[in-house]
Amino acid sequence: MTQFVQQVVAGLGDGAIYASLALALVLIYRATHVINFAQGEMGMFSTYIAYALIVHHGWSFWPAFVFTIFVSFVGGAAIQQTVIRPLARAGELTIVMATIALLVLLNGLASWIWLPDEKILPNPFPTGTWSIGDVQIPQQSVYNLVIVLACVVLLWLLFNFTKLGLALRASAVNPVASRLLGVRVTWMLALGWGFAAALSAVAGILAASAQFVFTPTFMQVTIIYAFAAAVVGGIESPLGAVVGGLALGVTINLLGTYLDEFVTPDMRLPVALAILLVVLILRPAGVLGRTVVRRV
Amino acid sequence: MTLRRRVPWGVVLALAGALAIVLLPFVLKDTNEYRFAFVGSFFIAALGLQILTGYAGQISLGHSGFMLLGAYVTTILSVDHGWNDLATIPLAGLVAGAAGFLFGFPALRLRGVYLALATFAIPIALISLAKKYEGLTGGGGGKPLTRVVTGHEAYVTTWPIAGAMFLLAWLLLRGRLGRAFRTIRESEIAAVSLGVNLAVTKTLAFGISAFFAGIAGALYAITIGFVNPDTFTIALSILLLVGVVVGGLGSLVGVIFGALFIEYVPLYSPDILDWVQEPVGLSLDPKAAGAPAAVYGVILLLVLYLAPTGAAGLLRGFVRSITRRLYTSGGTEPPGQVVPKRREA
C-alpha cells in the first residue's frame, strides 16, 4: 500500500508535465485545427533560455522562470504570426509540415547556440521526501503538480471569466462570426500560440529540473506522452488533456512498478502507445471528447 | 473547335527520368552511385506514402516502421536461412503489406490527427520489439548482412525495382482503384454513395502503401549492408512525409524530387549556409552541431511558402506556360478550356 501511494504521487508528478504539454497541444488544436509537432521543441528551447539566464547570466531560478515564460509567450505568438499565419490558406498537411520544419529548426538552433552536450539545470526544489506514516512522498512531484495545476487554473479563469477569454473561445469555435462581431481573430490565434508556448515552457523547465541532465532532444519522448495524453483525453478537450496527462503518468508508473518483468523502462513508451490505441479503438474521439456524428 | 491530343507531359517526364537513371551510372562516381541507391529506396517508400497520403488522403507517420519490417525480413532470411537476398525482396514487401493491411483496421475508425498520432505507435513499438528480441534481430547493436555491395551494385539493384514500382503505382492509380482513392480523399460521403466500400478501400490503401515501404526497407538494408532498429525512427517517417510534400501531393513523378530532397538537402545544408552567408558578410561555422538541421528547417519552410504545391506544382506551372505559347500563337486561351463566347448585346 505504501508503495502504491508513493508510485501514484510520483506518477502524478510525471503526469503533470505531460498534462501541461498536452494542454498546450489542445490549445493550438482548438485554435488552428492542427497538431503542433514542434510543441515539445518549443518547450525545449524555452528551457535553454532559462538555463542561459540562470547559468550564464547569474539570475536566480524564479525570476528566470517567470521571465522565460513571458519570453516564450511572446515567442509563441511571434511564431504564429510569422510562420503559421502566412500558411492559413494552405492545406492542413502544409501547416503540419511547417510545424515539423519548426521542430527541426528549433532543435538545430538549440544545438547550434548551446552545443548538444549534457547540461544541468539547477533544481530549485528540495529533493527530499515528506513522510506521512510509512509513506514517503517525493516533494518534487508535489511541486510539479502544484505548479502545473496553478497554471491550468489561471488559464481556466482567463478563458471562462474574462472578455479576452470569451473572444479567444469564440474565435476558436467560429472564426468568421467572431470576425464579423469585431474580434481580431488573427491576434486571438497568436495569443493562443503564446499561451501554448508558455505552457510548454513550464513543462520543459519542470522536466529538465526533474531529470539530472538534459540535452536538445530531452523533450522528444515527453512530447509523445503528451500526444498520447491529449488524444486519450479527446484532442478538443482541455480538461481531457489534463486528466489524460495525469492518468497516463500514474498508469505508466504503476505498470512499471508492478509489471516490471514486461514493462521495462524501454517498454514504457510502447505500452503507453498501446493504451492509446485501445482507447482510440473503443472511443475514437477520446474519453472526454465530443463525438461528432458523421454520416459515413 | 479543333480537337488536338494534349501531350501527356507526365509520361514524357517519367520517360526522361528513366533515361537519366539509365545514363547516370556512366557519369557518377561510386560514392554518388551509393547515395543514389538510397535515393532509390526513399523513392519507393515515398511512392507508397504518396499513394496513401496524396491519393487516398490518409496521413501516416508509421512508414519507417514498415521499412523496418522489410529490412528485417531480408536480413533474417538471408543471414539465418541462407536465402539469396534479392529473393527476399518480394517477401519483405508482402510482410510489410500484410502488417499495413492489419493496421488499416483500427485506422478505419480514426481520421486526420487521430490517425496521424495512432500511426506514431508503429515505429516506436517495432523498434522496441526489435531491441527486445535480440536473438532474432541482433538487438540494439544491429545485424550485418551476408554481403557488402558496392555503390554500383546497389544502384543497379535498386533502380530497376524502383522503376517497376513506379509503373506498378501508376497502373494501380490510373484505374478504378485510383479513382476510388481520390474520391475518398475528396469526400467520403460521395464515395459511399457512389458504391465505394470505405473499409476495403482504406485498408487496401494502407496495405499497398506498406508493401512499397517494405520493399524500400529491404533495398535499404541491402544497400547499407547492416540493419539497426534506430535507423527507422519516426524521424525517418517524417522525412518521407517531407519528401511527399516537397515532391507535390498527388503526383507520382514529383516523388523523385522528394526523394532527392530527402537524401541531398541535409548533405548540402552546410554548403548552402556558406553560399548564403558569404554575400551578407557573416562568418558562421556551417559545420557546427545543429547548423545543418537549422538550415534544413529553414529550407523546408521556404519550400512550403514558395512552392506549396511542391515540385510537381512548379513543373506543372512551367509546362503550362510553355504549352500556352506552343498551342496558341497569338491567342490567349489554353487548349482544352472552352471559353463561352460572350453574347453581343
Image (tube, coloured by chain):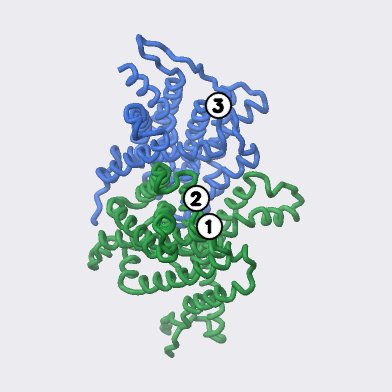
Chain colours: A blue, B green
Q: Nearer the viewer, residue B278 or A194?
A: B278
Q: As drawn, is B152 to the left or to the right of B166?
A: right
Residue B224, disc: 1
Q: As drawn, is A156 to the left or to the right of B102?
A: right
Asked if labels 1 and 3 touch by Cβ distance under 8 angstroms, the answer is: no
Residue labelled with disc 3: A66
Looking at the rendered structure, the kind of residue marked 2 is Thr
- Asked which secondary structure carries label 2, the reply is helix
Q: Badge 2, how many Cα within 10 Å: few under 14, some, many 20+?
A: some
Q: Nearer the viewer, residue A290 or A287?
A: A287
Residue at the extreme top: A133
Q: Nearer the viewer, residue B142 or A52?
A: B142
Observer able to see residue B106: yes
Residue drawn at the location 56% of the way across and 59% of the way down: B263
Residue B314: x, y in percent? 54, 68
Q: Tell me how far mark 3 sits from mark 2, CA to CA.
A: 39 Å
Q: Is residue A71 above or below residue A8?
A: below
Residues marked 1 and 2, same chain: yes
Q: Quadrant of residue A265?
A: top left
Residue drawn at the location 27% of the way across and 64% of the way down: B190
Asked if labels 2 and 1 touch by Cβ distance under 8 angstroms, the answer is: yes
Picture quarter with the C terminus of chain B:
bottom left
Q: Quadrant of residue B342?
A: bottom left
**Of marks 3 and 1, the one in the foreground:** 1
Residue A275: x, y in percent? 32, 39
Picture quarter with the N terminus of chain B:
bottom left
Q: Which chain is home to disc 2?
A: B
Q: Badge 1, how many Cα within 10 Å: few under 14, some, many 20+?
A: some
Q: Which chain is home to disc 3?
A: A
Residue B231, disc: 2
Looking at the rendered structure, the kind of residue marked 3 is Val
